[in-house]
Amino acid sequence: MDIKKYLQEKKEVVDSSLERYFPEEMEAPIALCKAIRHSLFAGGKRIRPILSMAAFEAVGGKGEVILPFACALEMIHTYSLIHDDLPAIDNDDYRRGKPTCHKVFGEANAILAGDALLTEAFRLMTSRAAWDHLLCSERVVLDIIHKIAQAAGISGMVGGQVIDIESEGKDVDLPTLLYIHTHKTGAMILVSIQIGAMLGGAEGDTLKAFTDYGERVGLAFQIADDILDVEGTAELLGKNTGSDLSKRKATYPSLLGLAESKKRAKELAELAVGALSTFGTEAGPLREIARFIVAREN
Amino acid sequence: MDIKKYLQEKKEVVDSSLERYFPEEMEAPIALCKAIRHSLFAGGKRIRPILSMAAFEAVGGKGEVILPFACALEMIHTYSLIHDDLPAIDNDDYRRGKPTCHKVFGEANAILAGDALLTEAFRLMTSRAAWDHLLCSERVVLDIIHKIAQAAGISGMVGGQVIDIESEGKDVDLPTLLYIHTHKTGAMILVSIQIGAMLGGAEGDTLKAFTDYGERVGLAFQIADDILDVEGTAELLGKNTGSDLSKRKATYPSLLGLAESKKRAKELAELAVGALSTFGTEAGPLREIARFIVAREN
């Protein structure tokens, strides 16, 4: 299969869904709309919603019922980027080649645009339009939203971000780095795959296989990100490279070296593929995504 | 009935619930725990959860099943205060007599503590422990969470906050002020009452009566807040009075004068009481709260 074509097609589906949820003329204060749209349509790769859709389809899920949940994952991801970029946190001026939200709309609007995206993600997932046509029960929908909140909150993304900030400029060991990676990025990637599978009806051993896949892909993704920060070009990344180094952030390359980091990322991708060994061609996209994630250039 | 005693008793129930959800030794990065606890246990009046519990009991709801939802409302309220106080937004150093979250823990931790509280509110409401023993269906639980997200997001609290910030230092007319008040504070107060009633089984005309009550109480509460900013003492409020004036924020007193504002607040409280005319003593606490809200000193 042509994985780049697959990713592009899925990305377009996600983009047009997000466009429906956040049209230019949405009913909200104009500054808020603009700040939200600036970041939501800044050229994100939509990896989380795509993983979710690929998992959904791998277990036989069909149609557009996954989209509100897939888009909610992207909204939560986007809120986290807006807040991370703030002067008080990472103080980044550019992301994906564009000025960051607070550079264009000011800090107050950026904080509130992030708050709004996080809140609207939960509004979207609980809207009748989102769950009324699902094949799974409302109990499963509540479980799915619970898992997403867990992955985004204290014991997930926000928790990882706090430790990441605390660790800047310090000597960090591998277990701490692993904690940061599995919480800050890993948890949301894992849950994207899990809830995609759950919406498609997966449970028990099937869900366990997707969980194994998700844990490995999540870590591989972050190691690849660390490597790109060293090796990538600013042009392809749309932000300055070497920023981890200049902020004295611990990364896989800084702790293990570039060669060993690349080796681990590839191993993890293959371990992820291995977790899906009982599935047939329906899991093809997930296998290809795992390999693509460690080979990508941005 | 002794409304102060009632409020104190309910506040203690909310406080001990929140203490269970966020104990000192909770599993999370220590800086995050401390920042969250600092703001969550800063002596809030717990008006939103209490309104929710009072509405729940007014329609015959019994027991502790309301608590996860009542506490989630307070968590969302607390997140909004932490973010509002940030230097980029209201830049407040004190709240309830204590230094604000970012003054003690830094801006990054304050932003993330707010993000965490908002996220954990949705985690709490979707946990099996929250909805497994409810008498209402999972569909109603999803509707309730949806209403809360709606009240907190773009078309509610965050939307109101954006317009409030935009309006600072400008001449604001009454419709704009009404928009700010009904969105920034009113929406969350209204939804607190609505979801309390819904969890107790209310629908149709009953829910409509609570909605009428909630809209009126929400606006009365904010007008009373505006009046306290002019007339209250810093000692009782735990923050500087006159802050609206110094920030050139439009308020009811600045637009209508103090006497007319007091008259409107009292009228709204009585209109709120009037909305509950078909209920008996079970709605007594709600009636008393409406009157207390416009007579309070902090």
Image: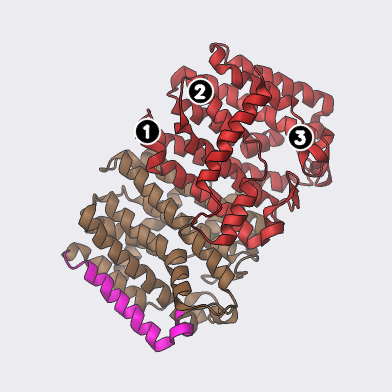
Chain colours: A red, B brown
Q: Is residue A29 above or below residue B246?
A: above
Query: Is B160 on the left or on the right of B57, as rendered?
Result: right
Q: Which residue occupies 39% across, 47% down?
A: B145
Mark 3 = which residue? Answer: A226
Report whether residue A155 is seen.
no
Instruction: Judge whether residue B282 is colored magenta.
Output: no
Q: Secondary structure at mark 1?
A: loop
Subunit ID for the residue under disc 1 = A
Tell me where residue B187 appears, x and y as whole percent. Answer: 41, 62
Q: Residues within 10 Å of mark 1 (few under 14, many from 20)?
A: few
Mark 2 = which residue? Answer: A57
Q: Which residues are magenta?
A: B252-279
Q: Which residue occupies 46% across, 44% down?
A: A124
Tell me where residue A70 appears, x and y as whole percent. Answer: 52, 36
Check chain identity for marks 3 and 1: say if they share one: yes
Q: Secondary structure at mark 2?
A: helix
Q: Earlier in the sequence, mark 3 or mark 1?
A: 1
Tell me where residue A59 appears, x and y as whole percent. Answer: 48, 20
Query: Is B231 on the left or on the right of A188, as rendered?
Result: left
Query: Is B64 on the left or on the right of A32, as rendered?
Result: left
Q: Which one is nearer the viewer's eye here, A87 or B18?
A: A87
